[in-house]
Amino acid sequence: MMMNLYVGNLPYSVTEDQLRSAFGTYGEVASVNVITDKFSGQSKGFAFVEMSENSAADAAIKALNDSAMGGRNIKVNQARPRGERPSGGPRGGSRW
């Protein structure tokens, strides 16, 4: 069973390869997606890492949450499905 992890407070210089390497220590990494600004291409300081096994994802959370990466203490937890995330703005996030 795949588990999607949210990784926050990342240094803006972090690469997908660096995250794949860090999380790969704990199990198979299915995908890494560093979130970037669509205009500047600059990292927004967070990413999603999808791991192939729940046990590997749990081990990665325990080991990497609040650990130092590039001078910052990163936050790692299970990503909530899109429908459970708070919407942006007072009108529910969608302008339409």
Image: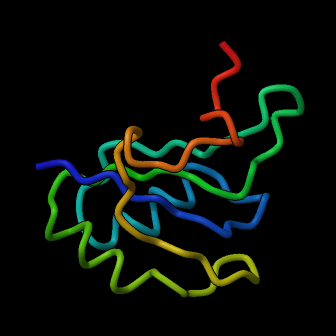
Q: Residue at x 75, y 67 (%)?
A: 11
Q: Is residue 43 left or right of residue 4?
A: right
Q: Residue at x 20, y 68 (%)?
A: 56
Q: Compare residues 55 and 88 and report the one nearer the observer.
A: 88
Indicate how the structure is coloured in the image: rainbow
Q: Is residue 86 left or right of residue 58?
A: right
Residue lying at the far right of the rendered structure: 40
Q: Residue at x 45, y 81 (%)?
A: 64
Query: Percent x, y for residue 28?
Result: 24, 56
Q: Is residue 43 left or right of residue 10?
A: right
Q: Residue at x 52, y 42 (%)?
A: 33
Up the image or down, 96 lies above or below 87; here it is: above
Task: Kindly indicate the quadrant of the structure image that contains residue 96.
Answer: top right
Query: Percent x, y for residue 95?
Result: 70, 19
Up the image or down, 36 lies above or below 48; here it is: above
Query: Percent x, y for residue 70?
Result: 73, 76
Up the image or down, 32 lies above or below 67; here it is: above
Residue lying at the far left of the rendered structure: 1
Q: Compare residues 49 and 21 and report the one nearer the observer.
A: 49
Query: Percent x, y for residue 93?
Result: 64, 33
